[in-house]
Image: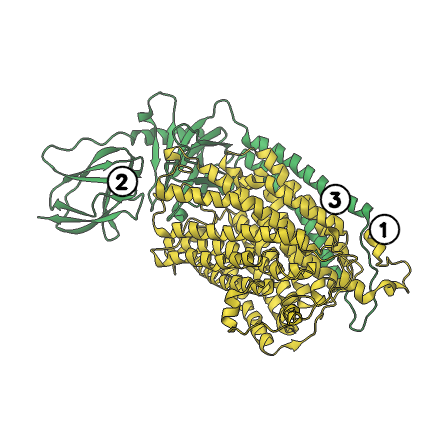
């Protein structure tokens, strides 16, 4: 009897699949829950984006009044950031990190389930403002004193605060879980410097969340006290300080940018080597650049506040420009990974290359904004809207789709159709640039963000119309994606355990993996244990100038001929 | 990808800096995107190619070089942007004109501060939703703009000056932000609130009209003469009391005698700016002077024919009510 209960393949008792998904503590199911839930919020916030773009297509108020418009952009920003980009990347991390480490699950499976289930609850609370006289309408940054009760009465804003507090709590719990998992659950042989880059980016992200999010959550609670119990944290008319709110918000809000970009960088750093058939160039440099970005991200927050007049400009300007250095190093590493590789332009690779070319634009416009004198002109204009979408959408969302196409075969055993995938990529890529590139020019010529209407004499009409067309093209591109996911899920091509010739441990188990993840693990001598398993020592015997992957290489990973 | 024609001395510096930064960014952009495209074409894997490419793990020399390159770029950028920043932030000992541009939901008020020690004589420009305020300014001399806020954060933004500064409510002991510029050319320049400030944020527009010193002096004389307080009400007229708190009138219905002039005693209980205007459809029958509270003014309203009219605050078009004139 005892042998039966210890056998991991033993059948558990049968439950309905609904109950199974609702009560699961399996990191893979929770990961999929995260991803599905995030995509639902992505579609909701995407519809809000279409509403915003429809209103701005031409001058005049056609569809909305100002109140509805302000709610639309506030909800769009809040939901996209807090309930799509952050959690969808957490979802992939949830699914993949334990597999990449050769671990059976996360360190705290029940806390993992809790940190997921807080998300739909928080999201529903945030949205429920619409049922009680209107959702929050102060922008996702909730600046004070506009967010104070006397300027923004109504329960929408309180629900927004409560919902965000829950979402913040979920993030904090999740980050502790990731840190514990990464430090304590690695398989034998999986040293820190053999961890896949994706795991490194998730680790740094988790540390950023752990340090930044509690500050924000405290700020949310202080604001709730201001609104409901006569606090005076942020209202200058009763001795509060509205700039303090901005410091609190951006002390969290800027690391937040890296919280959503680092895991996407991690995804891309997994995909580029696999589809170039080369190791990531400068693995250690990449790790240190990731840590560097994480550290610097805590010293740049006030660049969001250059025009407030209450900031020591040279310091924050310098630190902001400086963060371009580790980012630049990463770019060189990615490009060098492509150099002399053998590239397969599959859909995940296309999205990864899309990430490189689009995030680059967001990075460069960010460097422009780091100069205070230039920022005095561009701050709070559509240039900033363009910049942040090139980072969040051109960066993180391209990374999210790359991850979806890349790991879908692991999650389902079936590969998404390449033809539909490429249609999706190109519509998405063209639509994205059509929607957001013109915004640079709109901002440079002076169009402020968050305005419901603009004058027909301002000369902004054609660019706005282009942008709206682009937004609808992005929306259309979701259809080939959705059709692809559904059709593949039902009747897609079965591709086995390792369709891409992957480098990392998740490809060493079955697709989908069993609940306990691994029957046995391959030996781990580098950050590419699967590559080593497939190609072994002698893979380059006919090319003597190449570096041979040997266990001894772990000691000194340098020295390859360039 | 270029900003509007710069119309102040410092805006020209900012334009130059912007151009330098754009060119530096453009070079990086072309280089990186070019390499990605090149790699995607040049290094495509042939369908039946099973051989591995060289497995290159890294190269310390190259990595040091390409850490140094962005560091140098960043340092150059920091130096040139600090030089321009110092020019933009420079303050003159005695500006030619000092204007207090007060932001409030959702309008601007421009008060010209002169040195005669009597704030009552200052010229004031008020805006309405239909007619945004215009700030007349002389060219060729430093202009200082002081930016207090009566409620939430706004931002004073003139695209052709390539500058903005937030209008922050600072409480009793705080010092409001200031901005200084020297306009180089005559012309009318559009401006707008750039910091989201609530419902009618999009409507907080204004304009700056730059003119020669002589024309400006003439303008100022006229503006000052318009600042005299309204005469007090005749004793026999009907007086209707109306007050406003925040952005709400005390009532949404007023009754007035038809066919004879009457007085509206309009009391603003807080620091807001309001007026009372009477409309028949789109036609304006009466518009009282806009003023800032706390305080009251008596508006003398001409006789209205019997009927129902709308009254509203032109600063806050959301504040409306019905006025009924009965014989």
Observer-nearest residue: A449 or A22?
A: A22
Direction from residue A544 to residue A176 in the image, left or right: left
The residue most toward the bottom is: A491
Residue occupied by mark 2: B245
Image coordinates for residue B62, horizontal then vertical, percent: 80, 47
Tell me the SS state at disc 3: helix
Q: Which mark is residue A282?
A: none
Report the disc number at residue B67. Answer: 3
Q: Is there CB contact under 8 Å for labels 1 and 3? A: no
Chain A representation colour: yellow
> The chain drawn green is chain what?
B
The first of marks 2 and 3 along the sequence is 3
For marks 2 and 3, give the CA distance. Answer: 60 Å
Would you call the spot at circle 1 few (<14 residues within 10 Å), some (14-19), or many (20 or more)? Answer: few
Q: Secondary structure at mark 2?
A: strand
Q: Is residue B40 visible?
A: no
Same chain for the residues under marks 1 and 2 in the image = no
Judging from the image, mark 3 belongs to the subunit labelled B
- Residue B268 appears in the rendering: yes
Residue at the spot of label 1: A559
Q: Position of residue A59 (x, y in %)?
A: 42, 56
Real-space Cα separation, disc 1 to disc 3, in angstroms = 18 Å
Residue appearing at x 67%, y 46% in the figure = A291
Tell me the distance, in whole angstroms, between the alpha carbons under discs 1 and 2: 75 Å
Label 3: how many Cα within 10 Å (few below 14, some 14–19, many 20+)? some
């Amino acid at each position: 009897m005892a042998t039966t209960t210890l056998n991991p393949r033993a059948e558990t008792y049968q439950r309905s699949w609904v109950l199974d998904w609702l009560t699961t503590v399996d990191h893979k199911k929770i990961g999929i829950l995260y991803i599905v839930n995030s995509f639902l919020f992505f579609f909701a916030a995407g519809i809000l984006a279409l509403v915003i773009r429809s209103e701005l297509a031409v001058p005049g108020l056609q569809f909305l009044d100002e109140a509805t418009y302000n709610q639309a952009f506030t909800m769009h920003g809040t939901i996209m950031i807090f309930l799509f980009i952050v959690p969808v990347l957490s979802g992939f991390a949830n699914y993949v990190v334990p597999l990449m480490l050769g671990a059976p699950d996360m360190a705290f499976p029940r806390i993992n389930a809790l940190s997921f289930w807080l998300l739909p609850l928080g999201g529903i609370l945030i949205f429920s403002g619409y049922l009680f006289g209107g959702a929050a309408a102060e922008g996702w940054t909730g600046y004070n004193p506009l967010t104070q009760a006397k300027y923004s009465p109504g329960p929408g804003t309180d629900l927004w605060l409560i919902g965000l507090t829950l979402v913040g709590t979920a993030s904090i719990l999740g980050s502790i879980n990731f840190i514990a998992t990464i430090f304590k659950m690695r398989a034998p042989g999986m040293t820190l410097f053999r961890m896949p880059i994706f795991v490194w980016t998730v680790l740094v992200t988790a540390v950023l969340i752990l340090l930044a999010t509690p500050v924000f959550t405290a700020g949310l609670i202080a604001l709730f006290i201001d609104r409901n119990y006569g606090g005076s944290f942020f209202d200058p008319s009763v001795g509060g300080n509205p700039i303090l709110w901005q410091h609190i918000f951006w002390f969290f809000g800027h690391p937040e940018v890296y919280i959503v970009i680092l895991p996407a960088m991690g995804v891309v750093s997994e995909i580029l080597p696999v589809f170039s058939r080369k190791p990531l160039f400068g693995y250690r440099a990449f790790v240190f650049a990731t840590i560097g970005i994480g550290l610097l991200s805590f010293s740049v927050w006030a660049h969001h506040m250059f025009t407030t007049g209450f900031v020591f400009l040279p310091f924050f300007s310098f630190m902001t420009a400086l963060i371009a250095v580790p980012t630049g190093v990463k770019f060189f590493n990615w490009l060098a990974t492509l150099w002399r590789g053998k590239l397969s332009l599959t859909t995940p690779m296309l999205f990864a290359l899309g990430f490189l070319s689009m995030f680059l634009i967001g990075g460069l416009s960010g460097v422009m904004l780091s100069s205070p004198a230039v920022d005095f002109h561009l701050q709070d204009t559509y240039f900033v809207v363009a910049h942040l979408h090139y980072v969040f959408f051109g960066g993180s969302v391209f990374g999210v789709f790359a991850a979806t196409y890349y790991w879908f075969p692991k999650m389902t055993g079936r590969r998404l159709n390449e033809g539909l995938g490429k249609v999706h990529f190109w519509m998405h890529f063209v639509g994205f640039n059509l929607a957001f590139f013109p915004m640079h020019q709109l901002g440079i010529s002076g169009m402020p963000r968050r305005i419901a209407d603009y004058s027909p004499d301002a000369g902004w009409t054609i660019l706005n119309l282009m942008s709206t067309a682009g937004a609808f093209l992005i929306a259309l591109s979701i259809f080939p994606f959705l059709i692809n996911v559904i059709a593949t899920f039902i009747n897609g091509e079965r591709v086995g355990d390792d369709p891409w010739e992957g480098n990392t441990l998740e490809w060493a188990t079955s697709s989908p993996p069993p609940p306990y993840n691994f029957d046995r693990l391959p030996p781990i001598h580098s950050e590419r244990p699967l590559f080593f398993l497939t190609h072994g020592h002698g893979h380059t015997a006919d090319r003597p100038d190449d570096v041979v992957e040997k266990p001894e290489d772990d000691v000194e990973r340098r020295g390859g001929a360039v | 990808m270029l900003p509007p024609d710069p119309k102040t001395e410092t805006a020209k510096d900012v334009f130059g800096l912007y151009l330098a930064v754009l060119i530096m960014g453009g070079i990086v952009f072309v280089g990186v995107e070019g390499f990605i495209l090149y790699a995607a074409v040049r290094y495509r894997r042939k369908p039946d190619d099973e051989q591995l490419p060289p497995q290159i793990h890294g190269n310390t020399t190259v990595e040091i070089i390409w850490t140094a390159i962005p560091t140098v770029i960043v340092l150059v950028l920091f130096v040139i942007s600090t030089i321009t920043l110092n020019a933009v932030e420079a303050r003159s000992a005695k500006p030619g004109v000092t204007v207090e541009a007060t932001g409030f939901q959702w309008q601007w008020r421009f008060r010209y501060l002169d040195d005669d020690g009597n704030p009552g004589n200052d010229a004031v420009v008020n805006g309405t939703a239909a007619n945004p305020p215009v700030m007349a300014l002389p060219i060729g001399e430093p202009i200082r703009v002081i930016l207090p806020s009566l409620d939430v954060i706004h931002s004073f933004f003139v695209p052709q000056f390539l500058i903005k500064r937030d209008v922050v409510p600072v409480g009793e002991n705080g010092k409001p932000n200031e901005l200084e510029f020297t306009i180089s050319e005559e012309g009318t320049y559009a401006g707008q609130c750039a910091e989201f400030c609530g419902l009618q944020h999009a409507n907080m527009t204004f304009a700056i009209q730059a003119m020669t010193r002589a024309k400006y002096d003439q303008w100022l004389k006229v503006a000052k003469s318009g600042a005299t307080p309204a005469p007090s009400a005749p004793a026999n007229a009907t007086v209707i009391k109306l007050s406003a708190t925040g952005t709400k009138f005390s009532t949404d219905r007023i009754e007035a005698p038809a066919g004879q002039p009457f007085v509206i005693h309009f009391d603003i209980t807080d620091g807001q700016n309001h007026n009372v205007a009477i409309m028949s459809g789109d036609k304006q029958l009466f518009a009282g002077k806009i003023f800032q509270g706390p305080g009251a003014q008596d508006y003398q309203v001409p006789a209205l024919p019997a009927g129902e009219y709308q009254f509203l605050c032109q600063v806050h078009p959301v504040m409306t009510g019905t006025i009924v004139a009965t014989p």
